Amino acid sequence: MGTQKLIDQDSLIDTVDLRRGRSRDLIRSVADRARHLPPKEQALLNEVYAHGKTVVEIAKSTGETPSYLRRKVRKLTARVLDPRYRYVTEQRSSWRPTRRQVAEACVIEGLSIKEASDRLQLSQYVVRKHREAIETMYEAAPKLSENN
């Protein structure tokens, strides 16, 4: 999950390039998947994709720099479009509480093993093992359609 190429790099760059026009399907997909993110991140993606605001407009209202927000939007978009993200959002309700918490922290919120460990008050070993189990389940699962 952490060091692997998650999506074909060229297609990802085209998808998250904020200067390009966006298809309705992309807007709908990002907005739908963003509902699983923490409220601030969800609001940022909704402003960009659903409401069509530019990063500069958002930066003026939030006090953040446009370059910081651009990076953040690119990372969030890449995360929500990752098939692992979709897998976790669809499967996590059937998992035990600890695995669900690790999945939400690492895959949905994008935290590192150390950050998740600190937040969840679990050892890094436990977080790593749950993350590996999630990756194994994802790899073994039938591949989901990329349209949604």
Image (cartoon, helix red, strand yellow):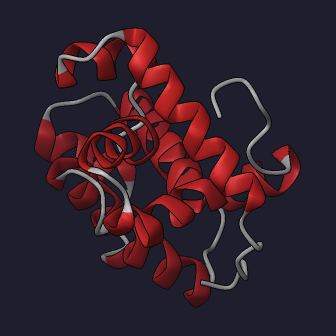
Residue 148 is situated, as x and y percent measured from the top left of the image, at 59, 84
- How many marks do you count on the picture? 0
Above or below for 29 versus 10: below
> Residue at coordinates 58% horizontally, 39% vertically from top-left?
133
User: Which of these two is toward me, 2 or 40?
Assistant: 2
User: Which of these two is toward me, 5 or 99?
Assistant: 99
Above or below for 120 versus 14: above
Residue 21 is situated, as x and y percent measured from the top left of the image, at 63, 73
Question: Seen in the image, is 15 located left or right of residue 7?
Answer: left
Let me know if residue 96 appears in the view: yes
Question: Seen in the image, is 138 located left or right of residue 7?
Answer: left
Quarter containing the N terminus: top right
Question: Outermost residue toward the bottom?
Answer: 24
Residue 55 is situated, as x and y percent measured from the top left of the image, at 37, 49
> Residue at coordinates 23% horizontally, 30% vertically from top-left?
64
User: Which of these two is toward me, 74 or 84?
Assistant: 84
Q: Quadrant of residue 99?
A: top left
> Residue at coordinates 66% horizontally, 55% vertically from top-left?
138
Residue 15 is situated, as x and y percent measured from the top left of the image, at 69, 61
Above or below for 11 versus 103: below
Let me know if residue 19 appears in the view: no
> Residue at coordinates 25% horizontally, 17% vertically from top-left?
122
Q: Quadrant of residue 37?
A: bottom left
Question: Outermost residue toward the front?
Answer: 96
